[in-house]
Amino acid sequence: MSVLTRKISALEKNVLSDEPNPKDTYLGTNNKDENELFRLSIRIKEEQKRQAIELEKKMKTNPTTDYTAEIKAIVNLSEKDQAIVTLSNNIYRQRVMHLFENAIAQYAHFNDPGAKNLFYMRFYWFLLEIQDYLWHYNKERSILDEPGFFDLCPGEREKKLKPVYDTWRGKWFSDKSFNRWRKICTDTSPKPKYSKEKEKELMDMDCKYKEQDAVHLKEKCPTCKNQCEWYIKQLHETLK
């Protein structure tokens, strides 16, 4: 076995794997400014987490004390810190979506505009649907797991669960749910945004092609003369 063959064999055994390392985000960057931004953002979040853990300990020790002010102080970052965290999250999100889009393009929509629109319409609906479901499920579990909950009378238990069950749906991920969501969220696909001038240009072009089709049909099928003339007239009306 040659030296090169042994090296390749070692790489296959020790490096190459079908399962990615869960600690590797595949979002590394050599941009110094971005790395500094990420470092500052992580430091801010870790400090926020540390304060939250400390406050949680205090709340367990003195559960009757009002900690509203302390909670707000932890949650509401300064304008500068919030700007750092927001920008960092936006860059990270864009990179994740870039990787996601390239991966999905190979398995789902193949960059076909119609398939892409359909995929993202369903995808965004699924994300919001599962978010809604998990919120209700976790809220219900947190109430049921409260110490002494089942020692309460049925009326008190019902009162505690009422806010959750008032908006609880019998069935998630249904066609009815999807149609209801479409009426609320009308702009969900990652389609390009055109100016009014560009939209008119595209509409004019579309009508021009349809008019050419109508003329072609008229030449191929003289018996459809009246119908073709009516169709062309309707296209001109659309362009006005």
Image: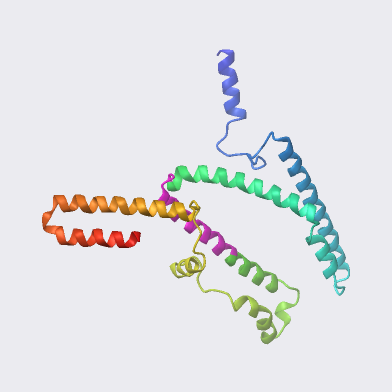
Q: Is residue 148 left or right of residue 189?
A: right
Q: Where does the C terminus fall, quadrant-wise?
A: bottom left
**Quarter-wise, where is residue 98 in the image?**
top right
Query: Residue lying farthest top?
Result: 2
**Which residues lie in the magenta part?**
110-131
- Front residue of 10/94: it is 94
Residue 127 in the image, given as x and y percentages of width and height: 55, 59
x and y percentages locating residue 196 in the rendered image: 47, 56
Q: In the image as oriented, which residue stretches furthest toward the left?
A: 223
At 50% from the left and 67% from the top, the residue drawn is: 181
Residue 111 on the magenta span = yes
Out of 233 and 49, give the one closest to the viewer. 233
In the image, residue 167 sits, relative to residue 235, either above or below, namely: below
Q: How many marks?
A: 0
Task: Estimate the x, y position of residue 156 in percent, counting from the top left.
Answer: 70, 84
- Residue 113: horizontal and vertical position, in percent? 42, 49
